[in-house]
Every structure is written in C-alpha cells, then in structure tokens.
Amino acid sequence: MVLRFFHIVLVLLAVLTLTQCGVKRKVSSTVPDEKTSKVGIEGFTDLCQAYDSINSILISKAEALFISNNERYEALVSIYAIRDSLIYMSVVNSGFEVIRASIDRDSIIVIDRLNKIVYTSPVRKRLGHQNPVDFSDIQNLVSRYYLCDEIEKARELDFSRLAFEFNEPYIKKSIVLNRQTLLMDRFEFVHSETKSHFMGERTGGAFKIYSNFIADEFEVEARGGSLSYNKSINVKMQVNRRKYTFVNF
C-alpha cells in the first residue's frame, strides 16, 4: 500500500500545478505574474522573467481522488518544493497523516506512518537500467517555472503544442504544453529496454495516468488547495528508530 500511495504522490506532482486544477494562488512574499498575452516559446520566456525570484513552491491541502482497479481513495495532499534541492510531500486521510515522503537528487524516503515503516531508495541506480524518472524530471512536473532552466530544450511542435524534450540513452522524456495556455497537455517518460513508463494526458478537467513504474495504472482527479511562493515550512523526516522498521527497495 505504501508504494501505491507513493506512486499517487508522483502522479499528483504532474497534475496539481501545471494543470491548475482549481488550485488557488495565495499571496506570499513574492508572487509572479502567471499570465502573458504571448504564446509558444515567446510566451513561456515572458513567464520566466519571474523565475529568479522563486525559491520554493508550496501546494497546500489539495483534494485528490484516486481510482485504480475499481478501488477509490480520497486524501488531502500537500507538496513543498525547494528549488534544485528537495521535494517534500504529505498525504492525509481522515484527518491523519498516512504518508510523508521526500525526494532529493540522491534518495527517496517514504514514511508509512500507519505501519511504522520507513522505505528508502536511491534515485539513480548504481548498476543496471535506470528508472524512467529522476529528481529533475519530477521537479519539472511540480511547476512549469522549473522548466525555465530548460528553455533551450523547448520546441514548437505545431500551432497548438510546445514540447520540452530531455531524452537520454534508452529513455524518452518529454513534457508537452498547450501553446496558447502554456499549461501541460501531457508528459511521457519511457524506458526502451525495460519498458517501464510514467506518462499522462489531459482528459477534460483531470489527467489519465498510465504507468507500470512502482504500481498499477491510476486515474487521478485533483482540485482545490492553495499555491504559495517563497514560503518556508519545517520539513521533518526524522523518526524514532526504535519504533520504525527500515526497508530498502
């Protein structure tokens, strides 16, 4: 169950901010202008004028509904991203935090607070084929502002789509934005050798996610929550080691 919840968290990273699924912007120390009259690469470059002023992004208490194999899960999810450093997530169900997770450039930590288990894993494997996503990929899905560092990898596919491509040997990686709204239409991370994949596309007001990475296929709907910039929160990933079991996966 914990790995399934962790996969849900990865899915939400791709849904909440880039799709603006009802997320309300909350004023903090610096709030960038999220609108431009221009389109395509020119419009995206306009949005990036505010990027240097953004040190962190916080999405608070977004409502999420997960559907998989005829099972439904409801939760409140908060995501906190410190630029080029850390992505922190908290999943709350029925008023109790069930999952707390963090991702940095080196490691993944997932705390299963229900079963008192801490799962750890390196982001990149030392041997063998790599996972289809790494820290930079996940950060790019948190907010379109993180794509500002990758503007040289953007290209206009046609009159309706703007694509960012990060292909590696054996792994195809792309994020496609709507050229007019500059919001995400789809993302795709596929390993040609292992066939592991993590991808999604907009279907109406939600995203349909396809993946065999960590867990089964999910359909996700997200709404509500608030979006803040440059807000500092206390990130606590320490646990009482006498009460928790530690597992490497």
Image (spheres, rainbow, N blue to C red):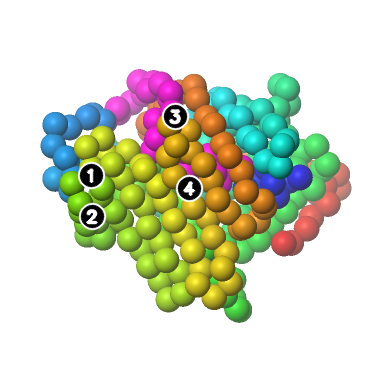
> Do callouts 3 and 4 mark residues in contact (Cβ within 8 Å)?
no
Circle number at residue 200: 4
Circle number at residue 157: 2
Q: Visible in this render: residue 81?
A: no
- 134 or 192: nearer the viewer: 192
The three-letter amino acid code for the residue at tag 3 is Gly
Could you tell which of marks 1 and 4 lies nearer the N-terminus? 1
Q: Residues within 10 Å of mark 4 (few under 14, many from 20)?
A: many
The span from disc 1 to disc 4 (Cα, nearest Å) is 18 Å
Q: Residue at x 30, y 28 (%)?
A: 30
**Which quarter of the figure has residue 171?**
bottom left
The picture places residue 24, in percent across and down from the top left corner, at: 41, 21
Circle number at residue 160: 1
The three-letter amino acid code for the residue at tag 1 is Ser
The magenta-colored residue range is 8-32
Q: Residues within 10 Å of mark 1 (few under 14, many from 20)?
A: some
Could you tell which of marks 2 and 3 lies nearer the N-terminus? 2
Could you tell which of marks 4 and 2 lies nearer the N-terminus? 2
Q: Is residue 105 magenta?
A: no
The three-letter amino acid code for the residue at tag 2 is Leu
Q: Residue at x 61, y 30 (%)?
A: 65
Could you tell which of marks 3 and 4 lies nearer the N-terminus? 4
Q: Is residue 21 magenta?
A: yes
Q: Residue at x 62, y 49 (%)?
A: 217
The picture places residue 156, in percent across and down from the top left corner, at: 20, 53
Q: Visible in this render: residue 28?
A: yes
> Do callouts 2 and 1 mark residues in contact (Cβ within 8 Å)?
yes
Could you tell which of marks 1 and 3 lies nearer the N-terminus? 1
The picture places residue 10, in percent across and down from the top left corner, at: 56, 46
The span from disc 2 to disc 1 (Cα, nearest Å) is 8 Å
